Amino acid sequence: MATIMSQVAGARSARPTMRVPSEAPCGLSDLMAGQPVETFEPNRALFWENAPADHVFEILSGVVRLYRLMADGRRAITSFVYPGAFLGMSFAEAYAFGAEAVDTVRVRRLPRARLLESADKAPALRRELLARAVDELAAAQDQLLLLGRKTAEERVASFLIQTARRASSHGTFAKEIALPMMRGDIADYLGLTLETVSRIMSKLKADGLIALPTPNRAVLRDPAGLSAATGDDTDADLTPAVRRTVRQAAWPI
Amino acid sequence: MATIMSQVAGARSARPTMRVPSEAPCGLSDLMAGQPVETFEPNRALFWENAPADHVFEILSGVVRLYRLMADGRRAITSFVYPGAFLGMSFAEAYAFGAEAVDTVRVRRLPRARLLESADKAPALRRELLARAVDELAAAQDQLLLLGRKTAEERVASFLIQTARRASSHGTFAKEIALPMMRGDIADYLGLTLETVSRIMSKLKADGLIALPTPNRAVLRDPAGLSAATGDDTDADLTPAVRRTVRQAAWPI
DNA sequence: CGAGAATTTGAAACCCATCAATGACGGTGG
DNA sequence: CCACCGTCATTGATGGGTTTCAAATTCTCG
């Protein structure tokens, strides 16, 4: 049950062109194509929470973290954003949360006003925006179940499976994944502490489910076992490609 | 920071016509107007997780809970849906989660295909769908912060404030609120157990912040104190109307 | 009024957080 | 080249907030 949405969420940023072909006239990517490429060093902010939402960003390479802060400094990372995704559209005139480069990030930036102009003219663009909003919604709801009801081990296992799925292409499942974010980032994404994330990683390693060549790289030695540790339905968990397309076809508005 | 989104989330279901005037030609409500009214008794399912998403629902009265289940029965309630909201559009060909009547619920139902037809013809309708998707996204992200980083007391206080805000109109803040859902529903919404919800309610009562004339009715004796207990920025927390409109104006796509 | 359900309250256990220290890594400069 | 240092990750010990198990109380409704 949860798997359908998970897979969609996994597909969301990694391969958006499959759902919304970039060859389509006046797609989001086409609008961006003319813009210069900018680079953000690790931990640099693309924009801050509550800052005027002047621009829309397309992620070309690298990973971005989106976060929200409480008054006392507690942080929730609402998502990690991978190449192919767009930032800054899904929200209000002020950015609803901050965005920071996890590693070196290359982006294209478009003035918000320009996007709005184009959206008025091109219905296909609005359809694409809607599709992307719906995908983000699906990802957020996955996360609600994870944060509300999963144990620490299930959360970490889910995160690893999700990241592997994002790194996968077609039917092949990536068994080695990059973890450019620090443990504290993962913790704020999973609603845990960095120590707990580290401990669970060590436990998964001890159980033979994963290996950690470096702290920023994980090898999934037993994907099926890891998938079983997520608490989700395990069936078809490692063959996401099929159900992905189902859902894409299903959102026609 | 969190307050902006909270307020939007609060406004989302309660007063959608303010953002998307129902007088507009071919709005979502207009499409629904011709459909007969159906009634669901408490705890009856409007639809199940993974069932074919044949219909779209408009909630006329009552409260609906949206939930997702894990294989072993653990449940997360992703949102409570109030009159004025629409169900079944934001998702795929199969409903991504179940919907059940909390109390007696009256709805209008529209075949999905009919909505899609109309969406092709009316750009205003697509704009409305997008606006609603974005609002749902904002609400979901509020909940991510709550589930990931708030204490039990902060969660319950947030829930009470959120519910009061939904029951409010214009600048007036509702001090007495209905809680038609059971403690277990609230627990699954807040990522707690029903016992913890009950205990915190009792504590808030003992602290003089609320009163509970019946278990299904709460009086906010000290809204400011309760708001302070949410962990959010307290300023302007009780005057949601202003910022609401700001955000509405800000989402023009 | 009585029966069943929902809520409240209590006691104990547990998972995870907190506090603290050690270890590993990478870059820098001597 | 290697010692140094800061940052991050890991591991350990302890404590606390929440869960779990259980019972009592209240509420609802026929």
Image (cartoon, coloured by chain):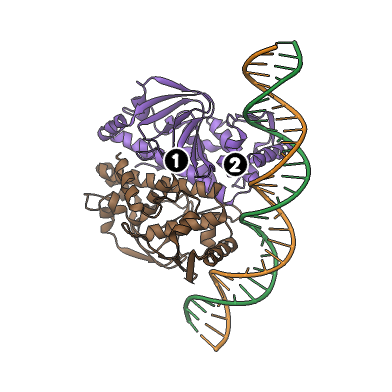
Chain colours: A purple, B brown, C orange, D green
Secondary structure beneath dot 1 equals: helix
Query: Gap in Å between the C-alphas at discs 2 and 1?
Result: 17 Å
What is the crowding at mark 2: few (fewer than 14 residues within 10 Å), some, or many (at least 20)?
Answer: many
Q: Residue B181: image x %, image y %?
A: 47, 64
Q: Residue A78: image x %, image y %?
A: 50, 40
Q: Residue B115: image x %, image y %?
A: 31, 49
Secondary structure beneath dot 2 equals: helix
Q: Residue A189: image x %, image y %?
A: 55, 40
What is the crowding at mark 1: few (fewer than 14 residues within 10 Å), some, or many (at least 20)?
Answer: many
Residue B189, visible in the rendered structure: no
In the foreground, B132 or A135: B132
Compared to residue A18, the image places residue B183 above or below, namely: below
Residue for badge 2: A158
In the foreground, A167 or B36: A167
Question: Residue B167 sits in which quadrant?
Answer: bottom left
Instruction: Name the N-terminal-most of marks 2 and 1.
Output: 1
Tags 2 and 1 in contact by the CB under 8 Å rule? Answer: no
Type of amino acid at the residue the image marks with label 1: Glu
Question: Residue D7 sits in which quadrant?
Answer: top right
Compared to residue B211, the image places residue A251 above or below, namely: above
Quarter of the image with the C terminus of chain B is top left
- On what subunit does the disc labeled 2 rest? A
Residue for badge 1: A136
